[in-house]
Amino acid sequence: MSLFNTLDDISLQEELDKSATLRSTSIKEDKTPQEDTSTEPIYREQQADNKEAAPQKKRKSIDRLKFLKPCTRCGGRNFTHCRYTGFFCSDCHPEITGDPAYALGNPDQKSAPAKTEAEKAFAAGSPWVFKNKAALLAAGWTRSELFRRSRIRYPAGNWGLAWLSVWLRPGVQARLVEKGAVKFHFVANDRKITQSTSPTDRVCKKNRAG
């Protein structure tokens, strides 16, 4: 065997060793643990399940209100109740948020306005005044003194006999006595009370006021 053949064998053996080393290194690199990405879709599925299983908020019950009438613009009955601003039609004002409400009121039914104290007194006293109108006029009363309405807020001012606040007393009884005076009898705090008024008294009050 020549020297050249020996050198060729040595170089070939070195190349084979290098290739074997590279092969073993690549195998080791392949065996290194890689990140397990298989859990990611499972985690996403669990999140989706948790969202589905999450308790949903209970929807607020709708208040059905008899005093609330349908919307005058569109006729809708669904309203939104804001705590500090009132009721708004859900169809005309969808941008407003609040508690839902449903109008049960009749749009054709008109609610009567509340009577004032003066109107209540007139309703209670005017029947007696109309019944005794002739006797009152004969006793010195004038029509103005019987039915006059004052410009001053009730009960202050010079109101006519039919508007007096004494008519609001429970169980009050009125009677015409001498000199055209009208006496009122009623019970207050377990005591019998008598009050009277006459045309001359009202003329004096009118003169003092003027």
Image (tube, rainbow, N blue to C red):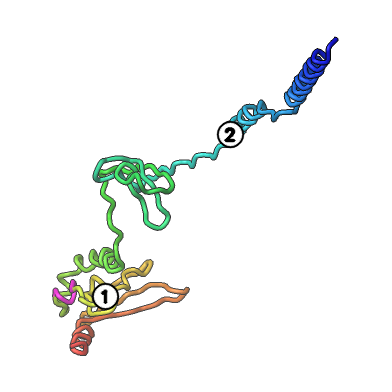
Left-right relation of 179 to 90: left
Left-right relation of 209 to 80: left
Image quadrant of residue 77?
top left
Image quadrant of residue 65?
top left
Residue at image point 74% right, 26% down: 29
Q: Answer whether residue 1 is magenta in the image.
A: no
Label 2 is placed on what type of residue?
Answer: Lys
Q: Position of residue 133 (x, y in %)?
A: 17, 69
Q: What predominant SS class does the magenta segment belong to? A: helix
Q: Secondary structure at mark 2?
A: helix
Q: Nearer the viewer, residue 69 or 162?
A: 69
Examine the rendered structure and indicate whether residue 201 appears above or below residue 102. Answer: below
Q: Answer whether residue 145 is magenta in the image.
A: yes
Label 1 is placed on what type of residue?
Answer: Arg
Q: Name the residue carrying label 1.
A: 153
Magenta stretch, residue numbers: 143-148
Q: Secondary structure at mark 1?
A: loop
Mark found first going from the N terminus, 2 or 1:
2
Question: Considering the image in quadrants, where does the N terminus appear?
Answer: top right
Q: Name the residue carrying label 2.
A: 51
Q: Nearer the viewer, residue 157 or 176?
A: 157
Q: Nearer the viewer, residue 70 or 207?
A: 70
Question: Considering the image in quadrants, where does the C terminus appear?
Answer: bottom left
Camera-near label (2 vs 1) is 2
Examine the rendered structure and indicate whether residue 26 appears above or below residue 138. Answer: above
Within-10-Å neighbours for mark 1: few <14, some 14–19, many 20+: few
